[in-house]
Amino acid sequence: MARQILATCGATVCFDRLIQYVLDKRFFALILRLGYDRLVVQYGKTAAGRELVEKLTSEYTVHDNVFTVNRLEVQLLAFDPDIVKKYTAQSDLVISHGGTGSVLDTLRCNKKLVVLINTELADNHQLEIAEAFEQEGVLEYVRGGFSEFLEVVERVNCREFEPLAIPEGKVVERIIWS
């Protein structure tokens, strides 16, 4: 049975560190060992994001935004307005920036979630949101660098999470202000 990971930066901005991590050969080796055979990398709609992806994948033969490394198929995706239906819901694991929309979409689909905080944002709410959701037992987030990222992905792969509680309204406000 096919197993898929979605790595997503969200719609607007490319998150360079996330893209660098998920297009690293050591990450490919890890997820192959964990039994995944498909990786979808959504990198955002910016020219800089496209250029970064092209640089990181230059050694591969990319055809129609897809390439293969060993038995791993990697699909590159700028953006799809139906990402939740087409990719999040079809994935076994999601690796995401800490944006509220991406986090909530993934949790509503009851998917395992690793959040990588984009520390370069000016008004960084991502850490606060990731910490609060981690305390709820519904995701894990990466606090450090690449080696911790690999450890968290491996740990989350084997872990069962609490389902996201059905909100009684204002779920984000409740988590942030509690």
Image (cartoon, rainbow, N blue to C red):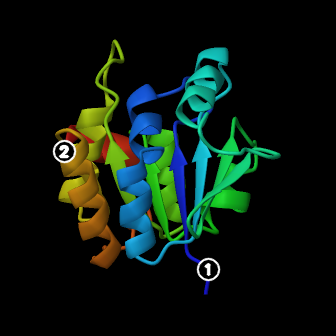
Question: Is residue 24 positioned above or below 167 on the image?
Answer: above
Q: Amino acid at mark 2?
A: Ser
Residue at figure coordinates x 73%, y 44% from the top left: 62
Element type where label 2 sits in the image: loop
Number of marks: 2
Query: Which percent across, then down, holds residue 149?
Result: 26, 49
Q: Which residue is mark 2?
A: 178
Element type where label 1 sits in the image: loop
Question: Is residue 54 positioned above or below 2 on the image?
Answer: above
Answer whether residue 99 is visible to the viewer in this image.
Answer: no
Quadrant in the rendering for residue 89: bottom right
Q: Is residue 60 left or right of residue 123?
A: right
Residue at figure coordinates x 61%, y 87% from the top left: 1
Q: Residues within 10 Å of mark 2 (few under 14, many from 20)?
A: few
Question: Is residue 96 positioned above or below 161 on the image?
Answer: above
Answer whether residue 123 is visible to the viewer in this image.
Answer: yes
Q: Is residue 117 left or right of residue 50?
A: left
Query: Which percent across, then down, holds residue 67?
Result: 68, 52
Ranked by sequence position, the earlier of labels 1 and 2 is 1
Q: Which residue is mark 1?
A: 2
Distance CA(mark 1)–CA(mark 2): 39 Å
